[in-house]
Image: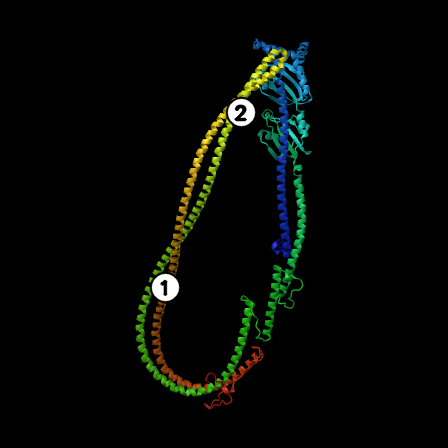
């Protein structure tokens, strides 16, 4: 039993509905606070995390784009430098001279010579040194070394002829024949020429990471590829750019080539090694963005942003840059905000908990007090039901104050009821408890009980008086009964004669009743037929009413529909007016556009004149370039450099002339387009004017429709009103038919009752006949009974004396009740003037027995 009680108590404790109000309020406040804290914390953490994710991704992407942009600029500048070097006249002349040595020789002979020279280059004898020295010590090689000194990032530079043999170099190469190298084949491109940028490799001679760049060398006309220039560019400067542009102390940058090989990273162990599979997947997807669910090269969870190289050499290089930052560092601000929110939430929870305890106490304390008083009232203890004054509970303007005031009114009410009960117990029935309201069941019942008691006691007092008077009358009646006995005999003889006359009258009445029964049957049949006709009329009236209601419903639907149509027509008119306004505005705008287009035509004509001027300038420039070339030829060796400049100026003049011709063609196309636009604008203006007139006509049509719809709406409203009046009249007709039907039914019932009554009357007459016969024999019996009555009169006199004694005892019992405000106890009082003393009858005297006279009867 103890364990069961403990288990039940534990279950009640777990059930919130069994908690005290104070605990429930505190639990609700803390629950709401905790829920709010959790929701706000989660929301703020998610919001901050998302914001941090976006800002970090954008920052890392921006940093990556900036780094790749700098790398692309560096690589473009390196290629531009080598392409400018390949335009040197000295290089072009030495290449053309080398290519000239192959003229007149068959391919097999050339191939054999190349093979022999390559073998010599790879040997260690004196012939190799002679060949290397001849190439290394020529003027172009000196020019290349001067160029290299001016550009320190160039680790190695050399040039080849169209067959891939070295012509000049800054330092000896490992091979003499280069045509079998991928960089040479990519740069020569089957004689078409193209820029080749190789992969990052470690240059042993320069002790640095470098990239091989091959550019084609064109002849003086710029149309034919006559050789290839290769430069080995030190890319350490690229890595320095990456390291100098590091965005913070906790991030890292990884650079991959197009094959997925790591060409730069902070960890030297991964250099020139294949990248992890997760980075290869991103590299192959070629889609920029960022991820937060990957690990870096060291396996640490990382925020990773990835970008791909763009620009001129994006496809050739295909480099991808991965900028990363540890997730723990990225979301550190979010965690700080989370901790801050938790601390603030804890403080708020503590403050609200304290306020909740105070609020719960302010609510629970008066409730506890009221509960204690209610328990005392429940056991009937009215000795101390007053709530202590001065605590201020009843002065509150909230539910607690209303509860206290209502409980005080309940106390007063119970005290009044208890006081009234005490007065009734003491016999005071004068003061009544007044009901507080119409719904005061107890007050009404208490008042009714008091009134009933007062009426009961008053009735008892009145009946006691009546019993006393009746005892005197009974004595007088006993005397008169003796006199009446002698008169009864005379009456009986008269009754015998009356009985004979009654028999004759009864026979006549029986015949009349039989005729009346036949008449009632006819009335009953007519009433039934009238009932059937009334029922049919009621059914027809119901059908008429139903039809009228359907018509009223349809009329109301018609009113709604026509109202909607009117509103739609109004909206259409408004729309047409707005359309008309817009069409007029469009008309103005189209006119302005036509003017602007015409102005464009005029401007294009001016541009054509300017282009003609530029064409003339190009022609004059071409003539000047030709004259400069002639003068350079006359100058001999001293004018070679000026001849090159004159040739370049001539080329530029020719290109300018071609460009002006293209611009002139474009101007003619623009002028033709402008003319077509002007024509289209004119046609558009005509169409706009047509649209304006049609929109105006549509507006007038909608106005007409709106007027017709409003007239139809008024007519349908009149139909609806008429159907409603018909519906009201049909309802009244239905009520009248129901009343007629009810009256007919009542007549039917009445006729049936009359028929049944006539049968009973016939039966009664038969009974009267038999009773008349019995009266004759009863008269004889009554005569005999009169003799016995004389003997019983003496017994009644004795009973009257006993009844008088009982009335006196009853008076003594009810004298303790107070029925009026004068505090006079009621008593049995008799008026001696109203008492008559009967004379001696049948040998008995009643001189000492008073008889109360009531309404003239003794």
Residue 293 percent coordinates (x, y): 62, 35
Vertically, is 470 above or below 134? below
Residue 255 percent coordinates (x, y): 64, 28
**SS at mark 1 in the image:** helix
The residue identified by callout 2 is 610
Q: Choose between 571 and 251: the one closer to the eye.
A: 571
Please tell me in which quadrant of the rendered image residue 497 appears.
bottom left
The residue shown at (54%, 73%) is 451
So how many labels did they put on this image? 2
Vertically, is 821 above or below 112? below
Q: Is residue 165 visible?
A: no
Quarter occupied by the N terminus:
bottom right
The residue identified by callout 1 is 741
The residue shown at (45%, 31%) is 679
Residue 801 percent coordinates (x, y): 51, 85
In this rendering, would 176 be left or right of 585?
right
């Amino acid at each position: 039993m103890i364990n069961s009680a403990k288990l039940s108590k534990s279950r009640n404790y777990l059930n919130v509905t069994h908690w005290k109000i104070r605990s429930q309020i505190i639990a609700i406040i803390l629950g709401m606070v905790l829920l709010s804290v959790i929701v706000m914390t989660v929301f703020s953490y998610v919001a901050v995390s998302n914001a941090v994710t976006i800002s970090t991704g954008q920052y890392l992407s921006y940093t990556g784009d900036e780094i790749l942009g700098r790398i692309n600029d560096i690589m473009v500048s390196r290629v531009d430098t080598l392409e400018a070097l390949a335009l040197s006249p000295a290089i072009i002349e030495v290449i053309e001279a080398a290519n000239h040595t192959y003229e007149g020789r068959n391919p097999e002979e050339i191939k054999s010579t190349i093979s022999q020279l390559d073998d010599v280059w790879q040997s260690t004898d004196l012939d190799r040194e002679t060949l290397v020295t001849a190439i290394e010590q020529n003027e172009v090689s000196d020019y290349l070394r001067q160029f290299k000194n001016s550009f320190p990032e160039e680790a190695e530079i050399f040039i080849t002829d169209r067959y891939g043999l070295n012509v000049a170099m800054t330092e000896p190469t490992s091979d003499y024949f280069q045509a079998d190298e991928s960089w040479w084949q990519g740069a020569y491109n089957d004689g078409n020429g193209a820029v080749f940028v190789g992969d990052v490799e470690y240059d042993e001679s320069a002790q640095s990471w470098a990239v091989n760049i091959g550019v084609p060398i064109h002849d003086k006309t710029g149309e034919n590829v006559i050789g290839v220039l290769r430069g080995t560019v030190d890319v350490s400067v690229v890595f320095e750019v990456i390291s100098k542009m590091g965005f913070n102390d906790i991030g890292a940058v990884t650079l991959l080539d197009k094959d997925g090989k790591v060409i730069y990273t902070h960890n030297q162990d991964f250099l020139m090694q294949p990248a992890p599979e997760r980075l290869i997947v991103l590299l192959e997807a070629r889609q920029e963005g960022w991820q937060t669910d990957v690990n870096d090269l060291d396996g640490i969870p990382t925020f990773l942003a990835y970008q791909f190289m763009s620009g001129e050499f994006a496809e050739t290089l295909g480099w991808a840059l991965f900028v990363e930052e540890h997730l723990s560092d990225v979301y550190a601000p979010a965690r700080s905000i989370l901790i801050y929110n938790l601390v603030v939430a804890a403080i708020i929870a503590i403050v609200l908990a304290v306020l909740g305890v105070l609020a719960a106490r302010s609510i629970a304390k008066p409730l506890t007090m009221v509960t204690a008083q209610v328990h005392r009232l429940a056991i009937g203890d009215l000795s101390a039901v007053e709530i202590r004054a001065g605590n201020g509970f009843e002065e509150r303007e909230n539910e607690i104050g209303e509860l206290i005031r209502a409980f005080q009114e309940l106390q007063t009410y119970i005290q009044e009821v208890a006081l009234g009960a005490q007065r009734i117990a003491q016999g005071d029935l004068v003061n009544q408890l007044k009901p507080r309201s119409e719904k005061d069941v107890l007050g009404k019942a208490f008042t009714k009980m008091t009134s009933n008691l007062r009426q009961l006691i008053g009735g008892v007092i009145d009946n006691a008086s009546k019993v006393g008077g009746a005892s005197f009358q009974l004595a007088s009646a006993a005397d008169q009964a003796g006199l009446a006995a002698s008169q009864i005999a005379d009456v009986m003889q008269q009754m015998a004669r009356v009985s004979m006359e009654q028999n004759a009258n009864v026979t006549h009445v029986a015949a009349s009743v039989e005729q009346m029964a036949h008449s009632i049957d006819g009335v009953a049949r007519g009433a039934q037929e009238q009932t059937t006709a009334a029922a049919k009329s009621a059914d027809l009236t119901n059908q008429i009413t139903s039809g009228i209601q359907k018509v009223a419903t349809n009329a109301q639907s018609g009113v709604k529909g026509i109202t909607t149509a009117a509103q739609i027509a109004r909206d259409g008119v408004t729309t047409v007016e707005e359309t008309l306004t817009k069409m007029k505005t469009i008309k103005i705008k189209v006119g302005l556009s036509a003017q602007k287009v015409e102005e464009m035509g005029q401007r294009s004509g001016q541009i054509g004149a300017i282009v003609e001027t530029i064409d003339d300038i190009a022609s004059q420039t071409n003539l000047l370039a030709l004259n400069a070339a002639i003068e350079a030829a006359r100058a001999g060796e001293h004018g070679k450099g000026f001849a090159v400049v004159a040739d370049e100026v001539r080329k530029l003049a020719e290109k300018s002339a071609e460009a002006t011709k293209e611009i002139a063609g474009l101007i003619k196309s623009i002028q033709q387009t402008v003319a077509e636009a002007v024509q289209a604008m004119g046609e558009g203006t005509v169409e706009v004017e047509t649209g304006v007139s049609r929109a105006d006509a549509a507006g007038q049509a909608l106005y007409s429709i709106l007027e017709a719809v409003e007239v139809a709406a008024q007519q349908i409203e009149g139909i609806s009103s008429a159907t409603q009046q018909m519906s009201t009249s049909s309802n009244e007709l239905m009520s009248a038919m129901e009343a007629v039907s009810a009256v007919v039914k009542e007549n039917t019932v009445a006729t049936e009752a009359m028929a049944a009554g006539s049968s009973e009357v016939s039966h009664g007459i038969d009974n009267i006949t038999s009773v008349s016969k019995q009266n004759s024999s009863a008269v004889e019996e009554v005569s005999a009974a009169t003799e016995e009555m004389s003997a019983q009169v003496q017994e009644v006199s004795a009973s009257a004396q006993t009844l008088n004694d009982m009335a006196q005892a009853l008076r003594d019992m009810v004298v303790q009740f107070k029925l009026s405000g004068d505090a006079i106890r009621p008593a049995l009082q008799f008026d001696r003037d109203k008492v008559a003393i009967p004379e001696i009858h049948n040998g008995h005297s009643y001189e000492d027995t008073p008889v109360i006279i009531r309404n003239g009867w003794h």
